[in-house]
Amino acid sequence: MKLLIKNGHVLNPATNLDRVMDILIEDGKVKTLKQSITNEECDRVIDANGLYVMPGFIDLHVHLREPGFEYKETIESGAKAAATGGFTSICPMPNTKPSTDCREMVELVMDKANKESVVHILPIGAITTNQEGSQLSDFKGMKEAGIVALSEDGKSVMDAALFMRGMQAAKKLNLPIFSHCEDKSLVGKGVMNAGKKAKEFGLEGICNAVEDVIVARDILIAKEPGCTLHLCHCSTKDSVTLVKMAKEMGLSVTAEVCPHHFSMSEDDITEDHGRFKMNPPLRKKEDVEALKKGLRDGIMDVIATDHAPHGQEEKNQSMAKAPFGIVGLETAFALTMTELVKKGYLTPMQMVEKLSYNPAKVLGIDKGNIDEGKVADIVIADFDREYQIDAKKFASKGKNTPFDGKMVTGQVVTTIVSGEVVYEN
């Protein structure tokens, strides 16, 4: 199939391309990229006049819930949500039931993905067996089956010696470690940020040290074997400071920020309701500002969603009882445009770096680039379209978001995966 995208403003950080161009796609790859291409022999032509054309977004951090919790999300529904949000590749975390901790489980996920997913599924394997923190899982077997990284997401490997051995083994296999950064001994029964809102609602708080202690620990542990360390869902100002220090030390450390953490603070929590409960929690305004500046200054490398769907009944209760989690695949681009690009923290090119080019570099994969010869994973978006977020229209099974009803700017128009249109608005 030949697909031609005409008149779109192409943003491609890999080649620093920032201009109106035509793109010819053939056999799933970008064949030609130039200012004017005739369309006589094309199967389809997409007129992208007034729109931006970018490498498809890559989400390093999602929860697809399958196997074990299919009522919350499936690989199929999560993939459709990803495509709606402009994501062409997503990395599901291993905290399913059973967890993705062996070759057989990775093969199961990949088989389901090959049959049911409209986007690329790049699974992440568990660091320890059943994520119990007692013995390392089969890294080699999982890599051969298709994992791109290792993580204990949902919890930290609290045994520092075991974590060190895991990093040493990951280093040998050239697999990055994705760190959850939560000290379980400090979190206690906390359900939201330890601040004025927690006191107002009479709820247990989660202090910044819960995150900061593990960020510092994992950076220092990673220094020894020289392992590639990626810090997940950073939410505090001191996390930004610690990542900056690690980079200045020359360590192979990267970090991600989630849209909910740079879009809301604890001051935006209007009631004691499960839709506001996420882990890490919504922090103070000074933390939010530090995250924005960290993204602006290139300290924080990636924007990832931590997409975590739950059933409506589970979330429709007090934060004391509701599970942690917020969906994000279908709101990430709009929130990034609204809160970062439109407010001057990021240029459009920097935004694409955080959502596509840098995530590909973290994984060491040949994506996040739509130059000639590259796989045609592409998103086309309207940077100026205003609309109201409507959770009822989400492709995801999860509707748990505090952004329902929020007015935003920036909407995905078309998502293309390996040269095939998989979503159109």
Image (cartoon, rainbow, N blue to C red):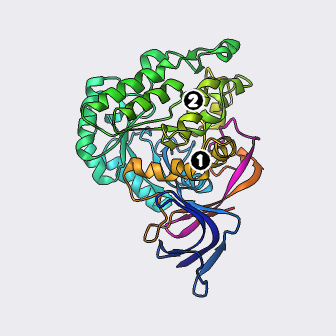
Assign the C terminus to one quadrant of the image.
Answer: bottom right
Q: Which residue is mark 2?
A: 290
Q: Residue 2, how many percent across, how many down?
A: 54, 79
Residue 72, quarter of picture: top right
Q: Which label number is shown at residue 329?
A: 1
Q: Which residues are magenta?
A: 398-421
Say few, some or many: other residues with alpha carbon within 10 Å of mark 1 (under 14 / 14 to 19 / 20 or more): many
- Vertical placement of residue 270 versus 101, above or below: above
User: At 39% from the left edge and 39% from the top edge, which residue is drawn?
Assistant: 99
User: At 50% from the left edge and 53% from the top edge, which residue is drawn?
Assistant: 356
The Cα–Cα distance between marks 1 and 2, rounded to whole angstroms, is 23 Å
Magenta residue check for 37:
no
Give amino acid for label 1.
Leu
Left or right, 154 with reference to 159: right
Nearer to us in this view, 193 or 78? 193
Q: Are marks 1 and 2 in contact (CB under 8 Å)?
A: no
Nearer to us in this view, 64 or 237? 237
Q: Residue 19, how many percent across, how many down?
A: 60, 65
Left or right, 206 with reference to 276: left
